[in-house]
Each structure stands twice: as C-alpha cells, then as structure tokens.
Amino acid sequence: MVEHWHPKQELESLGGQRSEPPKRASRVADVIKNELSVLLVQRVRDPQLQSLTISRVELTDDLRHAKIYYTLLQGKGGIGKASKSLSKAAGFMRSHLAKTLNLRFTPELRFWYDEEVEKVEKIERLLDDIARERGDRDGNSSENT
C-alpha cells in the first residue's frame, strides 16, 4: 500500500510547526503601551513624567494586571521622583484606558523601571571594546609582517 505524503505532518516531524497567533494579552499590551505613550506626550503635565518613555508592557493572561516598564532620559537618577509621579498619575491613566479600550476590566497598572535598556547598552559597549581590541591587534600583526 502506498502512503501519501502530507506536508503538514512532515513539517511537524521536523519541528517546523506553524507559529501560533499572538496571545490576546500581548496584543492588548501593545495597545496599552501605545495609549500610555500618547497620553504622556499629549495630556500629562507633570514635569517629572516628560522625560519618561514607556519601553514595554506585560499583561497577565486574564488582563487584570499590567506591568508598565519605563525608562528615563537622565537614567536611574530620577527614578524616585518619577515613581512618585507615576503612582499619582496611575488613576488618571487607568481611567483613560477604561475610556479608550473596550475591555470588561481595566487592568491594574504597576510601574517598573526597565533596566534591560542599560544592560543592552553595557553589552554593546563591551562588544565595541572587543571589536576595537581585535582591530588594534590585527592592525599590529599586519604591520609586523
């Protein structure tokens, strides 16, 4: 008996499965990030929040709790003042989200300073240093020959 070839089964056996569409929580998190970013630029008047950028939003699967990660232009120096201002503005931001998003529950907003940006910058500096050292070493070895 001749077996027919099934491309889907072949892909699954090789580990090449079709990627699942993004979860609803990640789509809603993207919308929240965009809404809060626009809100910070257009309507928030607190000077402590004007140098703040929303870097990412993580939302629980039940859409009840949101972790809002932010960065500051001046770096870690203004975290204390920014977190106080964010806690004061959290109600305003949440009510804005309730008006603009069509959700059964508006997520509770928690704000966290995003240290990943600084870690990435540190790694990039280290990689630049390594590349510069390799360039210097390769330049010296080619001069000696």
Image (tube, grey):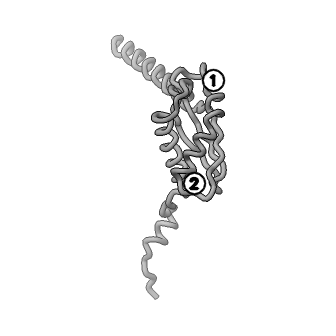
Q: Is residue 40 left or right of residue 62?
A: left
Give the x, y percent position of residue 80: 65, 24
Residue with the most extreme bottom position: 1
Q: Is residue 71 above or below residue 28?
A: above
**SS of the residue at dot 2?**
helix
Q: Counting other residues with Cα less than 10 Å from the Cα at mark 2, is it few (<14), some (14-19), or many (20 or more)?
A: some
Q: Amino acid at mark 1?
A: Lys
Rendering coords of residue 112 (x, y %): 63, 35
Q: Which mark is residue 81?
A: 1
Residue 110's tag is none
Q: How many marks?
A: 2
Q: Looking at the image, which residue is at 50% across and 49% down?
A: 31
Quadrant location of the C terminus in the rendered image = top left
Label 1 SS:
helix
Whether 51 is drawn above or below 145: the answer is below
Q: Position of residue 47 (x, y in %)?
A: 53, 24
Report the residue marked by disc 2: 25
What amino acid type is highlighted by mark number 2? Answer: Ala
